[in-house]
Image (cartoon, grey):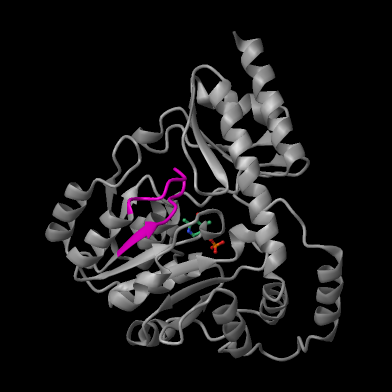
Amino acid sequence: MPNFYHPDQIIRPEILALSAYHVPPATGMIKLDAMENPYPLPLVIRDEIAQLTADAPVNRYPDASATQLKATLRQALTISDDMDILLGNGSDEIIQIIAMALARPGAVLMSVEPAFVMFKMIAAFANIQYVGIPLQKDFSLDLETMLAAIAEHKPAVIFLAYPNNPTGNLFDPAAILSIIQATSGIVVVDEAYHAFADASFMDKLAQHPNLLLMRTLSKSGLAGLRLGLLIGRSEWLVQLEKVRLPYNIGIMTQLIAEKVLHHTAVLLEQAEAIKSERTKMRTFLGTIANIEAYPSDANFILFRIHAASQIFQALKQRKILIKNLDGTHPLLENCLRVTVGTPDENSQFCTTLHTILSESV
Ligand SMILES: *Cc1c(COP(=O)(O)O)cnc(C)c1O
């Protein structure tokens, strides 16, 4: 009998050192932790989807190049014909494709901190060195430090979320442009929250050969489908396509996404509802003493509160699940993040928070 290896002996040390991305159980909870759109699709669209799925040839592999879906995306998102599109099983997979393709020995993947945690995690998966540059105290870009770090590390890629997660703010576009111009590598502007922000780098793609733009349908109501896209010049996307697994976008995702994209008015309406609820929630949080609620251009609000971890637990006991960021980064001490839900969910969150605070005084 062979002497079997223990995982410690053959799993890469960077992987052993990681903790798996934790998705907390949410059954029976008011779920305001994951930036999901709280609204279901209208019944008429769901009926059309039911018919589509009934007729789908699931015995066949899906269209590997998803030609029709890409054409629909190009129209719905007004993507220029000069730019190529690469599809991912969520934008998470696109981050992974980029990291794998660029992981030459010594290559660096750079981002800011705090940022979307998958940038750092995927760097570890793909065996590319990660460098995270802290944001300023007000969560704006520290341009001077970024430019110095770019000169020092010569990153192959820089990821910037616009708006940023978990802080919710849009970085100064002029600062992002300085970064794009200063780096020799590529810059991926991750517009996961584009539906809730009135700003985009889409119209900057033509001028900057090292700029790539990432979007996802997850935050606009289709998180369950898993569809993200990367938009950019073919000189980059042709190479990245080689790393994409051939059938990464399943037939159901292709059919349903295409169908829903023909009803963008519905998604826009839902995004508008979320934006107006966001204003109400931030106003509410602002009325509570000792809460600092940060401005948001996304579908969530970051706020700082005394004894955040206890407040988080107390909300959870009352079946309201938000995200505890306390302890995840020095700049996020005592910070919680709440996703904007339906008016009913939001008012339950607000009243419950109010109750907890009045009890604990
Ligand atoms: C949620 C999120 C993503 C990932 O979205 P998927 O398309 O669901 O994988 C990417 N970037 C940022 C900044 C996010 O917050």
Q: Position of residue 139 (x, y in %)?
A: 35, 41
- Which residue is depicted at the point 69% across and 55% down? 270
- Relative to 140, is 161 above or below? below
- Relative to 272, is 253 above or below? below
- Which residue is depicted at the point 46% across and 82% down? 80
In the rendered structure, which segment of residues is drawn in magenta?
Answer: 158-172
Q: Position of residue 293 (x, y in %)?
A: 49, 31
> Does residue 280 appear anywhere in the picture?
yes
- Which residue is depicted at the point 55% across and 67% down? 90
Task: Look at the image and say whether residue 102 sits in the magenta stretch.
Answer: no
Q: In terms of image quadrants, where is residue 269? A: bottom right
Q: Position of residue 48 (x, y in %)?
A: 84, 76
Residue furthest out toward the top:
361
Q: In terms of image quadrants, where is residue 47? A: bottom right
Which of the two residues, 27 or 356, is positioned nearer the viewer here?
A: 356
Principal secondary structure, stretch drawn in magenta = loop
- Relative to 284, is 173 above or below? below
Q: Position of residue 341 (x, y in %)?
A: 68, 44
Is 49 on the left-hand or right-hand side of 60?
Answer: right
Is 49 on the left-hand or right-hand side of 355?
Answer: right
> Does residue 221 appear anywhere in the picture?
no
Which of the two residues, 206 or 292, is positioned nearer the viewer here?
A: 206
